[in-house]
Image (cartoon, rainbow, N blue to C red):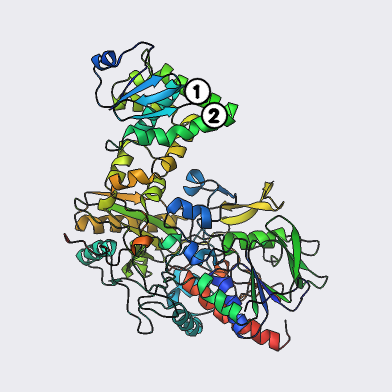
């Protein structure tokens, strides 16, 4: 059964966040007999509590605390206080994610070497290689039940996929299938298979899609070594005179502050909250924030080069039926500078329900040009572009100078400007996707701007040298040996692939490292 | 297109009809906007009923869907009346915003403009104002989040209780 640890227990590993990174790390450590407290800012909603309703679900799960935005990205204009569409709930954004589980390509760990120096980009090679991560990718795929691996069949294609596949064939794309999805295609792990319900983004009510909420977390709790404390918003990490972290201060639901002592602290609050917390933990000894001797905390914010293309046909599609991300084309994911940009991108089907389609198709638009698109909602097909964006020092999370949250903690400002490479890639993808749908007979296509960010990356990046980044190849901060980062903010660069599989793989690897170091009493 | 009549005391239904209504009729009566044809009415408590009638027309002009009845536009904007009841500054913004629309529309006011394009031309002039943004921003949720309108667009909504689409057409496309 779930453990309950004393606030003064300074032998525990405290993990901040219960999503792909934190939830996985917590279970992996608990399985090894390490005592873990996960502090989760959100409430605990089990999967039967999820709702098949976009706005109601958003209210239930989304991280809605105010943030500010700046920069030339359109999100700053259309959604100035909602830069990211991520989750504040036990399970974190693994409740909301689509399930796409792709390994990075070899060159994506070596972008500086492969792409060369690019003006306005802060490229850097990862301190690890694909071959080092491969055994952990395999463990993650096995844990998550990724289709197309371990002899698990791929999911059947829905209507939206069939349109995509027909267009891919017409354009001569070769690698198009229903993806590698952490969604059960067969019953396994005491969870049922996909019922093609749609609403993957609203939390899978069948539990068919992998989420730490109903896999890692209960498994960890069953060991007796894991306690998950919901409604616990961490506001500060404390340290001693020697510079080691000693515990964290968090606000309970009613605002009351508590301190949980810790032997080790792992930050996994996603790429906006994690740097916010490190920056807010500044002290006399660390005036620029914890683990920030490089000055890189909060910098190099990446969000993938995204965008969508929706298309209308003269016959019905009903794209919303079935798996939200129902298929993929990988041909454009290669690095091929002849296209006018470095790196690559994936096409993945996507569907929004009518309420969110109205909000996101062309935010701010009105009049007949806009409404005639929605009039044909059931004749629409759609896809999402997800490509590698360039890390830029100027794209960063900072603490707001004036605005504070209910706990008195400065809110995060998210600044983002597209790099010219991002824009070139997006325009290429818009053109290809429009051609793809035209080839199947689309009568109208809509190059749809990026949504608030779902893939938030890079703000505590991994680097070989302490001067270039925040953490080493194990996610251990260069400056403080018992402070770790366990989420996508570790990413040195973003790659073209959806990040969750890599976050989970890194967390499994990090758990091995932490347990070894604890045994050796080096931390 | 919707033609709006400001009902005057004693104006009979026959007289109303004599004025040559095209499509649906909205009638102002006391503190309410009434659709006699479709048997619904919307009471206002803070905003003037004429203001509410104009808001309904404005809502349709912002997000025109000819197959969506006025009732759903009325439901979509009624929150502004509630908000105006709680917040005097908000009430002023709405009333002033509507008065400004009427002024820019000439003698017959906003609702007196016969063509959608004429009304849209007026809306374009105020597009950047907080008033317009409040109306449009609220509407994108309050109109499209009405479950009643979803079938009009072919959106089926909740599917879990029906067992998803695994046996209900997730892959039933036949024209490819």
Rendered residue at 41%/35% (across/down)? B75
Residue where numbered disc 2 is placed: B84
- Alpha-carbon span between mark 2 and mark 1: 9 Å
Image position of A152 (left or right of A122): left
Q: Is residue A109 above or below residue A199?
A: below
Residue where numbered disc 1 is placed: B95
Residue A298 in view here: no
Image position of A498 (left or right of A461): left
In the displayed orientation, state which residue is furthest to the bottom: A520
Mark 2 vs 1: CB contact within 8 A:
yes
Nearer the observer, A461 or A200: A200
| Corner quadrant of residue A515 | bottom right
User: What is the x, y in percent for residue A344?
Assistant: 39, 66
Residue neighbourhood size for the residue with mark 2, other residues' Cα within 10 Å, grouped as few (<14), some (14–19), many (≥20): some
Circle count: 2
In the rendered structure, find residue A385 and report the number of the disc placed on it.
Answer: none
């Amino acid at each position: 059964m779930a453990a309950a640890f004393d606030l003064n227990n300074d032998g525990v590993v405290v993990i901040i966040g219960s999503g792909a990174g934190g939830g996985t790390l917590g279970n992996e450590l608990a399985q090894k007999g390490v005592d873990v407290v996960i502090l989760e800012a959100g409430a605990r909603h089990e999967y039967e509590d999820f709702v098949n309703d976009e706005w109601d679900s958003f209210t239930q799960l989304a991280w809605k605390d105010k943030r500010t935005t700046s920069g030339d990205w359109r999100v700053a204009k259309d959604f100035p206080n909602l830069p990211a569409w991520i989750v504040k709930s036990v399970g974190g954004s693994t409740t909301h994610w689509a399930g796409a589980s792709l390994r990075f390509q070899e060159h994506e760990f070596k972008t500086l070497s492969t792409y060369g120096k690019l003006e306005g980009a802060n490229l850097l090679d990862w301190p690890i290689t694909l071959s080092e991560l491969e055994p952990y990718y395999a463990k993650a795929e096995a844990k998550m039940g990724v289709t197309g691996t371990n002899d698990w069949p791929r999911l059947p294609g829905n209507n939206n996929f069939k349109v995509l596949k027909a267009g891919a064939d017409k354009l001569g794309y070769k690698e198009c299938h229903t993806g590698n999805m952490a969604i059960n295609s067969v019953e396994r792990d005491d969870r049922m298979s996909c019922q093609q319900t749609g609403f993957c983004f609203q939390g899978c009510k069948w539990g068919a899609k992998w989420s730490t909420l109903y896999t890692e977390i209960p498994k960890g709790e069953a060991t007796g070594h894991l306690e998950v404390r919901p409604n616990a918003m961490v506001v500060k990490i404390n340290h001693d005179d020697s510079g080691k972290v000693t515990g964290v201060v968090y606000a309970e639901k009613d605002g009351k502050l508590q301190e949980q002592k810790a032997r080790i602290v792992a930050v996994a609050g996603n790429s906006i909250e994690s740097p916010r917390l490190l920056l807010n933990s500044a002290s006399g000894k660390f005036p620029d924030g914890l683990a920030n001797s490089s000055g890189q905390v909060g910098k190099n914010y990446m969000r993938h080069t995204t965008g969508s293309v929706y298309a209308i046909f003269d016959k019905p599609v009903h794209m919303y039926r079935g798996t939200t991300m129902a298929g993929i084309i990988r041909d454009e994911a290669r690095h091929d500078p002849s296209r006018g940009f470095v790196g690559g991108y994936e096409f993945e089907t996507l569907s929004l329900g009518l309420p969110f389609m109205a909000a996101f198709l062309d935010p701010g638009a009105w009049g007949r040009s806009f409404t005639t698109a929605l009039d044909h909602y059931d004749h629409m097909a759609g896809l999402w572009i997800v490509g590698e964006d360039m890390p830029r020092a100027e794209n960063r999370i900072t603490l707001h100078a004036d605005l504070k949250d209910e706990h008195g903690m400065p809110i995060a400002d998210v600044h983002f400007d597209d790099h010219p490479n991002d824009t070139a890639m997006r325009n290429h993808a818009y053109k290809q996707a429009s051609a793809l749908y035209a080839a199947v007979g689309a009568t109208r296509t809509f190059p749809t701007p990026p949504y608030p960010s779902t893939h938030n990356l890079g703000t505590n990046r991994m680097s070989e040298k302490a001067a270039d980044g925040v953490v080493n190849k194990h996610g251990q901060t260069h400056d403080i040996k018992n402070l770790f980062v366990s989420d996508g903010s570790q990413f040195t660069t973003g790659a073209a692939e959806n990040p969750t599989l890599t976050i989970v793989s890194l967390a499994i690897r990090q758990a091995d490292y932490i347990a070894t170091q604890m045994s050796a009493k080096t931390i | 297109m919707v033609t709006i009549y400001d009902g005057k005391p004693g104006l009979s239904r026959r007289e109303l009809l004599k004025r040559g209504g095209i499509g649906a009729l909205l009638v102002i009566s006391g503190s309410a906007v009434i659709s006699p044809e479709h048997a619904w009415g919307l009471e206002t408590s803070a905003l003037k009923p004429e203001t509410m009638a104009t808001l309904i027309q404005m809502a349709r002009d912002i997000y025109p869907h000819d197959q969506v009845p006025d009732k759903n536009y009325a439901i979509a904007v009624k929150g502004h009346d509630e908000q105006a009841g709680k917040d005097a500054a908000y009430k002023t913004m709405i009333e002033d915003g509507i008065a400004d629309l009427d002024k820019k529309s000439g003698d017959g006011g906003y609702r007196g403009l016969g063509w959608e394009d004429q009304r849209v031309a007026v809306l374009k002039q105020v597009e950047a104002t907080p008033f317009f943004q409040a109306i449009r921003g609220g509407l994108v949720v309050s109109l499209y989040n009405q479950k009643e309108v979803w079938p009009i667009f072919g959106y089926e909504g909740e599917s879990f209780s029906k067992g998803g689409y695994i046996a209900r057409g997730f892959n039933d496309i036949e024209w490819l």
